[in-house]
Image (cartoon, rainbow, N blue to C red):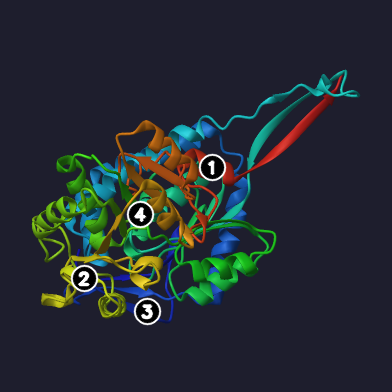
Amino acid sequence: MGRVKQPLWINGEFVETTEYSKLLNPYDETLIAEVAVAERQHVIKAIDSASFAGEQFRSMSAHERAEILERVVELIKENKEECAQIIAKEAAKPIKAARGEVDRTIMTYKFAAQEARRIYGETIPMDAAPGGEGRMAYTVKEPLGVIAAITPFNFPMNLVAHKVGPAIAAGNTVVLKPATQTPLSAYKIAQFFHEAGLPKGALNVVTGRGGTVGDVLLEDDRVKMVTFTGSPEVGKQIREKAGLKRVTLELGSNSAVIVDENIELEEMVPRIVAGAFSFQGQVCISVQRVYVHESIFTAFVEQFLEKVKELRVGDPLDERTDISVMISKSERNRVLAWIESAINNGAKLALGGRSGANGLLQPTVLLDVSREEKISCEEAFAPVVHINQVASLDEAIGLVNHSKYGLQAGVFTKDVGRAFQAARELHVGGVMINDFPTFRVDHMPYGGVKLSGMGREGIKYALEEMTELKLISFKL
């Protein structure tokens, strides 16, 4: 990829700024690019462009919007390896996982293209109520207008797709602020949309300080919706400042797995290991807590540790690497402090718990962690998992629910009654029966409860959030 200077992308052209920040590879700290830092006037210009483009774009036919999205799919396919390399370098995501993210991004835009062609309204039987006789009515779904999309570092292409894809499918225009550490993925996607024929101004990318960019987006009444993925702290601030703007928030989690008694471990353990350590555990639905029935606890831990020891740690560009560095040293140090606190308060360190070469945090497994420890009750977002034994499903459900988060949970059981009990009683946005909570396909509804957020992603469901329902009634 080489060193580049990356300006902003506003109104279909690059816009230079007076300040640029250095983007470093998290693994070896080499300079990847110098990235434009937007000032207030740049964000206003981006909103101007999106607002002006919206008048043209909302009148574009559904099939034309779908065809643009389909062309983006083809462009990503043609440049798959380049996209994966960008992700691996700016996010330190192992190249195998980066390629997987590109494949998912392709699917996400495919779903968006399909949904663009089937934005349905419905007819309303007005005569179902007295006084409605002699009338017919129907509904249509119209785009909201300008949507502000704020995305995180951990899936820098696919989470952009989950916001930009449905927005474009519905006829909205977008001002996108990607994460500071992973801007190049977003700029690459903007390039693909430009090449695919998206009208200028329909997608704008502004990088810079969260406060500067975010404050303008929240203040401007032309922005009709904010869709954000990130921390609960920032999510709360957005919700408080958004006023009458529509808001969807995908926030934190500390996802849990329940392993019931009499479960065969051979197939299930490797899946939970993958769910805990993929991309260094920096996944919103990464497995962080595992509650195992006491009758199989010892066997589970033994097999789990064996599989974790097989993971290869190293350079994200190495084809063999499973785990690389966390996104920053400060994040690594935070988690090391949490691990130390848990150990000092009675938890057992079964594996890892220290930094290795290049500051990599070794895959870490803790046993018998108090539910009040940060490594249990907060979001670790790191290659750390803790395993506790429980005496019953009821106890496990209580422990899972004893959390301020509620995104997804996994339950492994052979008992259909217990499966339905867990599905009914777990207070989360998604329950994965006989699977880990890290499971997601890109068309399913996805979102959480409590501090895990509000609203749902998944193209069809995000599109519902990004449209307004209009009723048309005729008196015959």
Give the Cα separation between the discs numbered 1 and 4. 29 Å
Which residue lies under the disc numbered 1? 463
Front residue of 319 and 22: 319
Give the Cα separation between the discs numbered 3 and 1. 34 Å
| Residue 163 at x, y percent in the picture | 47, 51
Give the Cα separation between the discs numbered 4 and 3. 41 Å
| Residue 312 at x, y percent in the picture | 9, 60
- Residue 20 circle label: 3
| Residue 258 at x, y percent in the picture | 33, 49
Front residue of 444 and 178: 444
Mark found first going from the N terminus, 4 or 2: 4
| Residue 324 at x, y percent in the picture | 18, 65
Question: Viewer-nearest of labels 1 and 2?
Answer: 2
Which residue lies under the disc numbered 4? 256
Question: Viewer-nearest of labels 3 and 2?
Answer: 2
Q: Amino acid at mark 4?
A: Ala
Question: Viewer-nearest of labels 4 and 2?
Answer: 2
Question: Viewer-nearest of labels 3 and 1?
Answer: 1
Give the Cα separation between the discs numbered 1 and 2. 46 Å
Mark found first going from the N terminus, 1 or 2: 2
Give the Cα separation between the discs numbered 3 and 2. 46 Å
Mark found first going from the N terminus, 1 or 4: 4
Mark found first going from the N terminus, 3 or 1: 3
Quadrant of residue 89 within the rendered picture: bottom left
In the displayed structure, does residue 374 sit left or right of residue 469? left
- Residue 348 circle label: 2
Mark found first going from the N terminus, 3 or 2: 3
SS under mark 4:
strand
Give the Cα separation between the discs numbered 4 and 2. 19 Å
Which residue is pictured at 57% across the width and 70% down the height? Answer: 237
How many neighbours does mark 2 have within 10 angstroms: few (below 14), some (14-19), or many (20 or more)? some
